Amino acid sequence: MMDLLIPDKTHDESRQGEALMLKAETAKNNGRKLYIESYGCAMNFSDSEIVASILAESGFETTSDYSIADVIFINTCSIRENAEQRVRNRLREFTVAKVKNPGLVVGVLGCMAERLKSKFLEEEKLVDVVVGPDAYRDLPNLIDQVDSGQKAVNVLLSREETYADISPVRLNSNGINAFVSIMRGCDNMCSFCVVPFTRGRERSRDPQSIVAECQDLFDKGYREVTLLGQNVDSYKWKSKVEGSEPEAINSVSEAETNFANLLEMVGLINPNLRVRFSTSHPKDITDEVLYAINKYDNICNYIHLPVQSGNSRILDLMNRTYDREWYINRIDAIRRIIPDCAISTDVITGFCSETDEEHKETVSMMDYVKYDFAYMFKYSERPGTLAAKRYADDIPEEVKQKRLTEIVAKQQEYSFYRMQARIGRVERVLIEGFSKKSDKDYCGRSDQNAMVIFPVGEGYKPGEYVNVLIERSTTATLIGKVVE
Ligand code: 5AD
Ligand code: SF4
């Protein structure tokens, strides 16, 4: 048994560089301490749990202070140039620790490790070990190799690895929300994206192991799971089913579990276990998935559906395999099948050859959907991607920035609009803990994933559900009071 201590559970910016603390069994303690910090997407944070778990098995304790660590791992992201720059700057800060402790092992994990491979060792002399996302089981051997004076690299990608048996180690200490990885890799080849190269081919995890993990989390008091994958809608698992009829003995057929089936299986664990998921792909999200969301109150009414661009020519260049009309059709289906569903998105501005007119179509898509939330980025050319090979990164930085500023302002308006629309309503909120600003307030999320703040009171505590009457809002938060 082990549990993880992390100061708080949020996502994205506020978690970048967060250190992971794992309280491991002391029985196998080898006297060495691991410091691990993570960058990038939720999948990386989830992977760091797997890494910490693997090393706990070989006797490592974790520390949140890298200056006393024997092993420093940095789990990296390659999605945009600035994500990589951030990691390189951070590595410089470990130089002093290495001078003080020449036996210190410094390792680079994750997408940057996979992308740069042994080049990393040449470029960053500080680094001893480079390990890609499918090679974490090999970490104890790789550390041994470094201990014996060599540098070590394992960036082999796998078609099968899902770490299915290494999951139940949790990153966030609140004991309420957990990420559960349901698949790895991506087969989509969006032309801007480095992920298919750094995380390899798509593979799904056995649904039984997913359900067992979620059930176990629920039994331990967790009340929300977020099912993670680069493209959850293409989740697919084939299992062999033995025939039960006498004449069918020895006959084996195949049963397929798709994402809608998986959602239902997890949703059925308990009505008090909320189920979220990320990320959906507009080309793959089916009405069957939407009906499953609508059927169960505990499958949350919130869909992250990255649009990337509102213009069909740009979508084609991006190799997204849908066009503007298709995306709008999916939005309309969500609105039709799931009344009151929040929708968020990802947008890239200034993709290769994007004109002002085409950019305006992204803006008009935002007007059409009125997203609850959006992650917005300037296009950043990534070496080795299809776009880097085929198209010139020809939109000047100022234009990319101007377009980004415009859509960020637009999104502020719509986030506020969506928040304001909740005023006067009663939201069912899963309490996560004290609000960041004050221990007189609790915070938690609504079904639609909005952050809700309300006064601490008798009779309810973190991990429980309360009904909150919304009285006011900012662009990012709903504020109210608990009602019966
Ligand atoms: N440049 C800018 N944004 C990117 N994303 C992925 N690759 C790039 C890139 N090269 C964004 C997409 C994706 C999100 C996770 O990151 O919007 O959905
Ligand atoms: Fe990248 Fe596209 Fe796969 Fe998302 S779906 S990880 S953007 S290739």
Image (cartoon, grey):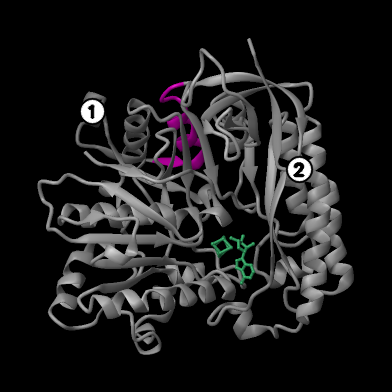
The secondary structure making up most of the magenta span is helix
Residue 59 percent coordinates (x, y): 15, 55
**Dot 1 surroundings within 10 Å: few (below 14), some, or many (20 or more)?**
few
State the CA–CA distance, disc 1 to disc 2.
63 Å
Q: How many numbered marks, from 0 up?
A: 2
Q: Which mark is residue 475?
A: 2
Q: Is residue 317 above or below residue 25?
A: below
| Label 1 close to label 2 by CB (< 8 Å) | no
Q: Is residue 400 left or right of residue 38?
A: right
Q: Is residue 271 above or below residue 170?
A: above
Q: Is residue 426 above or below residue 107?
A: above
* Residues in magenta, as a range: 256-270
Q: Is residue 265 magenta?
A: yes
Q: Quadrant of residue 382?
A: bottom right
The quarter of the picture where the N terminus appears is top left
Looking at marks 1 and 2 on the same chain, the residue that comes earlier in the sequence is marked by 1
Residue 353 percent coordinates (x, y): 78, 79
Residue 309 percent coordinates (x, y): 75, 62
